Structures are given as C-alpha cells and as structure tokens.
Image: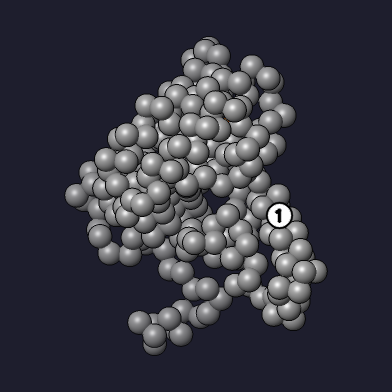
Amino acid sequence: MKINDLSRENLPRHIAVIMDGNGRWAKNRSMPRIHGHQVGMDSVRAVISTCAQVGVEYLSLYAFSVQNWLRPETEVRALMLLLKTFIQKEIDNLHRANIRVTTMGEIDRLPRDAYELARSGLEKTRDNTGMVLNIAWSYGGREEIVRAAKEIACKAARGELDPAAIDERCVARHLYTADMPDPDLLIRTSGEMRISNFLLWQIAYTEMYVTDVLWPDFREEETLRAIAEYQTRKRRFGRTDEQLSVNA
Ligand code: IPE
Ligand code: IPE
Ligand code: MG
C-alpha cells in the first residue's frame, strides 16, 4: 500500500503509538537490545513522515515509560542518548516540515544535557502549525492522573476552583493532553495485548490496532495499513447501530 492508495475520508485526527518490540527484534538477530532501539529510530522517522503526509493532526509516541527506569542502567543510558541524538539530528527537519514538537511526562528527570536539548527543540517548533508530534518520555498514565488530581486539589484548597464544578472537562484540562483531542487510533506493535500505562484516561473510546510486527519493522506501509483498518471501524460511543445510521 502506498500513501496515494489511502482514502482521505475518515482519517484519524490523533494517533497514539506504543512502540514495542525493539528488544525482541534484536534478540531474533542475536544482537544486543540496544541495536533494536537504534533501528527503531528509523521507524520513528518513517511513522512521523507518513502521518504528516497523510494529514494526521496529532501523533503521540510512547518512547519511555516511568516504569522503564527500572531497566538495566546501560539500557536506560542508551535510550537517553538515542533521544538526545534524535532531537539533535531531527529537530531542523521537523521544524522545516512545520511540525510542532511537544512532550508529556517527567522530562525534568532526563539528564541535564538531554533536558536542555529537549527544551530548546520544543521552543524552536513552538509556533509551527502542522502536525503535533507529542513524545511521551518518562510518562505514565496513572502518574498523569495523580498529577492532575493534585493540581485540582491544590486549586480547590486555594479557593480557585469549586469542588462541585469538577467534571470530565476539568480533569481533562489538567492532563498533559489538555490541548489535544483524544486519540482516535491506538497502535501497539509486537503483539502484546495490553496498555502498559499509556494514556489511560484519554483512550476511553479509542480504536485499538495491535500488530505482531516488531517496532523496527513498522514503517510507512504498516502505518498506512493501520490507518486503513481504522477507516473500516464503526465507532458507536455506546449508542446502537440504528441510532448511528439515523444520524448519518
Ligand atoms: C520498546 O521496545 C522500546 C521501549 C520500551 C523503550 P522494548 O525494549 O520494550 O522491546 P521488547 O518488548 O523487549 O521486545
Ligand atoms: C511500553 O512497552 C512502553 C513503551 C513502549 C515506551 P514496555 O515494553 O515497557 O511494556 P511491557 O513491560 O511489555 O508492558
Ligand atoms: Mg517491550
């Protein structure tokens, strides 16, 4: 499948991706896990470029979870270095492509130099009007909800917010994704049927697409396949089929 084969109707506005399977990809080739992460960076580039060309408005990539800090130190260090290299090498290309880079998660836990780089990358692309590339780094869905709850509680304690006025919109406004629509499509590579603490609140009605393809092999063609599959889905949001055809 090529980009021009994809229907432009019913495109997902927001795609979220759990980029999984780098370690297994490398292991299958008797290589160290880190090699899988390195090759996986080419998939990151391919998916960003495909989504931008197709006209996806928001792309959220799960790059490193809060729980991934528990991995061996050498692997954590290699992943930090990869993020840094990615920003160094790609930020100009992203900027030229009018992509706005944002992050969600505890990015202040990054090593100082990577943190500074990430901040300057965000700053540089801040006013871009094309696709939003949202990188989840040291991110956890539960941690995000706890953080929102704390902020809301603090505002209530200071008298800035009436507890009776707390509703879904109020909670959503205190999440990292406050300015984004919920994901329409969640892609997970490498076959695992779980969420692994990604965007717990936001995926309430997101369409899921799980593929056995390992992340380093997930490129343009696989991205298009996932979007095409999404376009065949019928989203009911709790209603009946009959109601949907009346409203159509
Ligand atoms: C995903 O690949 C990348 C990160 C979680 C950072 P993994 O490293 O989890 O690869 P597998 O799941 O062990 O194959
Ligand atoms: C999810 O993958 C996190 C990222 C892709 C960054 P993991 O490999 O950490 O998930 P589990 O441990 O298999 O659930
Ligand atoms: Mg994994």
Q: Residue at x 54, y 37 (%)?
A: 63
Residue most extreme to the left: 4
Instruction: Name the one closer to the observer, 168 or 100.
Output: 100
Instruction: Name the one closer to the observer, 163 or 205.
Output: 163
- Amino acid at pointer 1: Arg
Q: Is residue 193 left or right of residue 7?
A: right
Q: Is residue 234 left or right of residue 79?
A: left
Residue most extreme to the right: 157
Residue 36 percent across, percent down from the top left: 49, 22
Other-residue count near label 1 (Cα within 10 Å), few / some / many at <14 / 14–19 / ≥20 = some
Residue 140 percent across, percent down from the top left: 66, 46
Q: Residue at x 36, y 52 (%)?
A: 127
Quarter containing the C terminus: bottom left
Quarter containing the N terminus: top left
Q: Which residue is mark 1?
A: 147
Q: Residue at x 23, y 44 (%)?
A: 2
Q: Is mark 1 within 8 Å of ligand 2?
A: no
Q: Is residue 55 left or right of residue 198?
A: left
Residue 161 percent across, percent down from the top left: 71, 74
Q: Residue at x 68, y 19 (%)?
A: 73
Q: Is residue 60 above or below residue 213?
A: below
